[in-house]
Amino acid sequence: MLGRDYGGLSNMAHPTKNAALNSVVLVTAPLGGCTSVERATLVQARTSLESEDIPMMMYRLLWLIIEERTGLIPIEAELSALPMSVSYVNEYAKSGRINAT
């Protein structure tokens, strides 16, 4: 589960051919400069992204960074530098969605 999450987030965050193509389509589409194939690629990427549970994926990623306990590899993140991330993890944990999966 985490491997798939990490792979999905990695594909979104790192410059890949698909990311570069999608960026080009996003920039040129409003100007009428993309082909139907490029539009289809963008629609496919958006559909794929929307089919994922991004809030849960982000929760798991941030939880791994923030959580410190015996048995986990210490990342030693400076939590004062991550106030929004800490807040997101805390609020998401209260939502009850964690136990639903």
Image: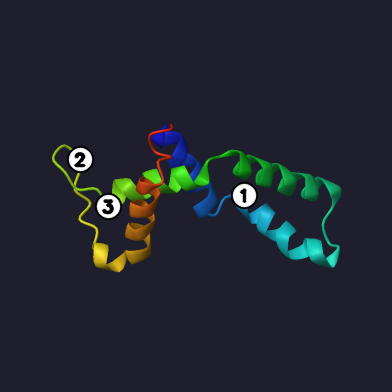
Q: Which residue in the structure is indicated by mark 1?
A: 17
Seen as rendered, the residue at the extreme left is: 70
What SS does tag 3 mark? helix
Q: Which mark is residue 72?
A: 2
Q: Residue at x 43, y 40 (%)?
A: 97
Which dot, 1 or 3, sits closer to the camera?
A: 3
Number of residues whose C-alpha sits closer than 10 Å to that of mark 3, classed few (under 14), some (14–19) or many (20 or more)? some
Q: Nearer the viewer, residue 27 or 57?
A: 57
Q: Are marks 1 and 3 in contact (CB under 8 Å)?
A: no
Q: Is 97 rendered above or below residue 77?
A: above
Residue 80 position within the rendered picture, expressed as x and y whole percent measured from the top left: 25, 67
Find residue 1 and report its image quarter: top left
Q: Which residue in the structure is indicated by mark 3?
A: 66
Q: How many marks?
A: 3
What SS does tag 2 mark? loop
Residue 85 position within the rendered picture, expressed as x and y whole percent measured from the top left: 36, 59
Q: Earlier in the sequence, mark 2 or mark 3?
A: 3
Mark 1–mark 2 Cα distance, whole angstroms, equals 34 Å
Q: Residue at x 35, y 52 (%)?
A: 89
Left-right relation of 6 to 39: left
Find residue 100 and report its image quarter: top left
Which dot, 1 or 2, sits closer to the camera?
A: 2
**Picture quarter with the C terminus:** top left
Mark 2–mark 3 Cα distance, whole angstroms, equals 11 Å
